[in-house]
Amino acid sequence: MKKLLVMLSAAILMATSFSCSSEKTLEQGDSAEISSSSVAIGDNSQNSLDWKGVYKGVLPCADCEGIETTINLKSDGKFTRTLKYLGKEDGFFSDEGTFQWNESGSKITLSSGQGESQMYLVGENALFHLDKEGNRITGDLSAKYTLPKNPTDPRLEDKKWVLKELQGKPVAKNEELKEAYIQFDMETGAFHGNGSCNNIFGPYELKEGSRISFGNTASTMMACSDMEPEMAFLEILRQVDNYSVTDSTLSFQKAKMAPFARFSLEKVD
């Protein structure tokens, strides 16, 4: 009996020690962003959150209207970043580099090719801009040091959508033209595809309520026998503001108008 009590006491001591050491893997103050009820002991931002993607917001600026900041975190440990100092001429900057996680897996440090670094606390669907010592910024503007993650939609993204209908008319097959299609990359927030003649690519942004907006669309400069289908496709990308996905069909709309374009999901054998 005495031996059994000794064994039980040892087991309780080990369990308590494990619990305490596991809780210390989260940085002090991180519990506000990482709920203990949804993250199991031993999990952290690095291994339990879907942190890959695009983060965008306007950070406070001492001598301008704000710094419009966009950060793309990639699964290979690389990042791209753009900074636009609002209200300033020539106030646009961009860089890229790598980022490293801290030991607890709660914070990252972005290191650019210019040797500059910046730390962020990684929360659920948000990055929190930290000071030079790696602490949360406090004060009246503290809430503004947050970069929300752009919404994602697995029904739409990382799939190939083949154009089947434009302005209510079926896309005619033409042996001289290529198959028109579009693909959305969830990790980078960029799309690419083909307009039937030229390769097309550019940024996009999803918003709540199945809304979508396309940034500046670029394309190659080939000339084909019939450029009308491609021109109509590109014009639709400029006008569309929402989409719907039903089974294997994607539709682009503007407001509540009839679909501008319909696509079919390409099935992978």
Image: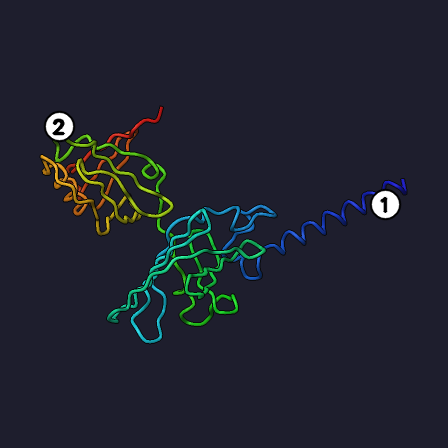
Which one is earlier in the sequence, the residue at label 2 or at label 1? 1
Pointer 2: residues within 10 angstroms few (<14), some, or many (20+)? Answer: few
Q: Amino acid at mark 2?
A: Ala
Image quarter of the C terminus = top left
Where residue 36 sits in the image (x, y, percent)? 56, 51
Closer-to-camera residue (7/131): 131
Q: Are marks 2 and 1 in contact (CB under 8 Å)?
A: no
How far, Cα to Cα, is label 2 from label 1? 81 Å
Where residue 4 sits in the image (x, y, percent)? 86, 40
Q: Residue furthest bottom?
A: 63
Return the residue at label 1. Answer: 6
**Residue in view at x 17 percent, y 47 percent:** 238
Residue 57 in sight here: no
Return the residue at label 2. Answer: 172
- Classify mark 2: helix, strand or loop: loop
Q: Amino acid at mark 1?
A: Val
